[in-house]
Amino acid sequence: MTPSVVLYAEHLLNIRQVTIFATLLSESNQETRAELSSDRRSLSLTHGGETATIYLPSEIAGNASLTLPMARSKVLSFRLQVTENMATLGGTQLSQSNEAPWPAASLSSETSVACRGCKDVFVKSSVITTWKDLPSEDWAEMMDFWHCHKPDNHEPQKADVPNPMKGYAACNALRTSSGTGLVDLCYLLISEQDCSGIQRTEDGLKCVRCDAELGVDDVRAEGLRLFKWSVSLQHAQNSAWETYPVQSFVCAQIQALLDAQALRKFVAYSGILEDTTGAILLWIFTPDLQYSSSLLPREPKRAMKILYQAVSNPHEVLEKQRSSVDELQLPDHILQTTRKDLEASTALLPISARKLQDWNMGHKETHLDWHAPGKGNQYMEASLLEPTQMITHVAKDPGVPPVQRHFVGVTDTILNWVTGM
């Protein structure tokens, strides 16, 4: 059944307001009314005998007035002031939790690593005793620029030739060692001696049991790069296997590029750039916001707001806009998942907010609350499925908490709602 009322809200940190959109199947009238809950954390709107409720991404100030636009329309929009403490602390709270899952500090000697699909164990507990976070990709270059006390070198040095005596030089690449695991935002770098059940192919590393794509061979580091989105982790013996959605790692990588390059546009592609025809141009419109929708479960979501468009000539785009566009290389199935996630998020937005000139508007969730081992993992596993498959997958699993089973029928509801408009 197509809902008569669909609500959507965003917390705009910079102006300390929550913007609310209400999409109706028929024009608003005198009987259309809205009201805040007593705790000022949710809003209900009634129209045509149907009521929709949305849990707001921030608490509304006590003196905020709730007045609907007088003009008759199928799309209503208005803003509400948030409380002072939420306005001042919101940005700090968000930035503090903006990190990729599984940093080195969360791993221990009891951590095991297995295939995300078949749970075949690659790295057994106690094999790796130490986990260390990797520096950024351009760490050597930055050290060369900013090192305060560089070691003396009295030997003549040729121009453009790295000095092998410098421990921080680019020629002195990090290398794996047995018993030590290195952790990046999107992958685990592990010595081959510590792994089993992994085979090398022309397409990269694959699981021996189920043939799933796992990562790539890092020749320079003399180790194996296992993508985090391809594995499951167990933090202690007999505990539940833990996984995260692909989008958590992709957003962490984008955020790292934002911090390092100070650019807002990225060409996401797979394979060789010159041969790629199915890339996505991403423009990070808002790096950090909270939003909620009456079509989604209760908890507001934290996300990046992204403008995106398909590009058939990514190499030309980069050549023409090299100073303002960076590249983001992803495996093909991760690129396709990213595309589907963005398209699904666009359907949640009001029709008037889905386009900006030639760009499509969407969200990419950056943080999920299902961190506890064994909670929500089935939904996380399902994030690689088609949207309708994901909903069915979660609906049939009795182990998924009720708040996540609320996703049942969401895809069909969105599609019916859009079609009905």
Image: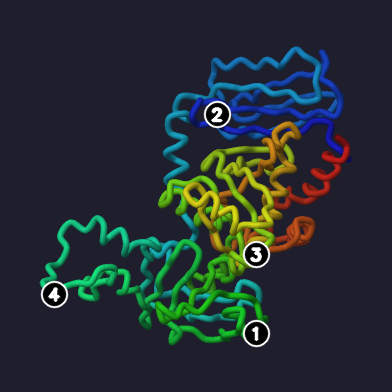
Q: Position of residue 138 (x, y in %)?
A: 37, 61
Q: Is residue 130 left or right of residue 149?
A: right
What residue sits right under mark 3 in the picture?
Answer: 276
- Distance CA(mark 4)–CA(mark 3): 46 Å
- Identified at 61% across, 22% down, the residue is 79
**Which of the pair 31/358 is nearer the observer?**
358
- Distance CA(mark 4)–CA(mark 2): 64 Å
Q: Earlier in the sequence, mark 2 or mark 1?
A: 2
Give the label on residue 209, or none: 1
Q: Quadrant of the C terminus?
A: top right
Which amino acid type is marked by label 1?
Arg
Q: Position of residue 18 (x, y in %)?
A: 59, 28
What residue sits right under mark 2 in the picture?
Answer: 59
Q: Position of residue 396 (x, y in %)?
A: 78, 61
Give the label on residue 155, or none: 4
Which amino acid type is marked by label 4?
Glu
Badge 4 element: loop
Q: Earlier in the sequence, mark 4 or mark 1?
A: 4
- Identified at 71% across, 43% down, the residue is 346
Q: State the image quarter where residue 179 is shown.
A: bottom left
Q: Earlier in the sequence, mark 4 or mark 3?
A: 4
